[in-house]
């Protein structure tokens, strides 16, 4: 159990915790959790009073934990699509076209000895990852060449790397990124 000394938590800090919790779901447990993590941060930094900056840091820590948990529990092929996007981003391709992403995905599957899904099924996985906010996918016209999807990673490379490092199958890819997928820089401008 945690207790606070009188004056250790100013009124404005409590209001900030409540406001931040209300933005999300309005759950009092979220506000209490935010205050608890902020107090731990304040204590570790040697502060005698919980400040707004501690609450902001706590909010970031909690959010990172949620992202990690969400990405860690994705199905295998969703993780493989995410791994492919990660590798493209590591090769300075910030906006991948769906064909390029699918080719990277096929190569990742090949390296791991996994049968790849069809491009249509991968397209569905991309839509699911888009709904989760992991990436942004938008249909773009390629003129007479038809339409494609431009896919942008919305999750930081560091967060994805952390998830990959904790996955027994996928962490092998991190060890040998250089031998994986080399992408021409002009691919990102198409």
Image (tube, rainbow, N blue to C red):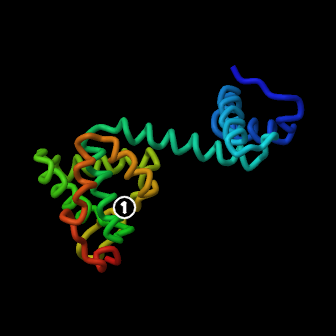
Tell me the residue at 23%/53% (across/down). 173
Outermost residue toward the front in this view: 46
Total numbered circles: 1
Foreground: 72 or 9? Answer: 9
Q: What's the residue at 34%, 38% (across, down)? A: 74
Outermost residue, bottom direction? 186
Dot 1 lies on which element?
strand
Residue 154 at what x, y percent from top left? Answer: 46, 57
Q: Position of residue 20 (x, y in %)?
A: 70, 41
Q: Left or right: where does residue 161 sit relative to residue 118?
A: right
Residue 80's place in the image compared with 33, above or below, is below
Q: Nearer the viewer, residue 104 or 150?
A: 104
Q: What is the quadrant of the C terminus in the image?
A: bottom left
Residue ID at (22%, 49%): 172
State the residue lying farthest toward the top. 1
Seen in the picture, residue 139 relative to 168 is either above or below; the reply is: below
Please provide percent x and percent y for residue 8: 84, 35
Quarter containing the N terminus:
top right
Q: Which residue is mark 1?
A: 151
Left of 168 or right of it: where is 133?
right
Label 1: few (<14), some (14–19) or many (≥20) C-alpha neighbours in 10 Å: many
Q: Is residue 166 left or right of residue 12?
A: left
Within the image, what quadrant is residue 87 found in? bottom left
In x, y percent, where is residue 66? 50, 39
């Amino acid at each position: 159990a945690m207790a606070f000394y009188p004056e250790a938590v100013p009124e404005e800090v409590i209001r900030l915790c409540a406001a931040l919790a209300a933005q999300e779901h309005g759950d009092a447990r979220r506000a209490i959790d935010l205050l608890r993590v902020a107090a731990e941060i304040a204590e570790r930094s040697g502060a005698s009073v919980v400040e707004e900056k501690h609450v902001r840091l706590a909010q970031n820590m909690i959010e990172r934990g949620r992202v990690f948990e969400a990405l860690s529990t994705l199905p295998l092929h969703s993780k493989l699509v995410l791994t492919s996007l990660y590798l493209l981003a590591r090769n300075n391709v910030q906006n991948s076209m769906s064909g390029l992403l699918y080719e990277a995905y096929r190569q990742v599957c090949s390296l791991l000895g996994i049968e790849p899904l069809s491009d249509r099924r991968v397209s569905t996985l991309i839509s699911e990852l888009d709904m989760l906010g992991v990436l942004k996918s938008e249909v773009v016209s390629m003129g007479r060449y038809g339409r494609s999807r431009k896919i942008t990673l919305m999750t930081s490379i560091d967060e994805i790397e952390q998830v990959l490092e904790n996955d027994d199958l996928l962490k092998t890819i991190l060890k040998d990124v250089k031998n994986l997928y080399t992408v021409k820089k002009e691919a990102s401008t198409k």
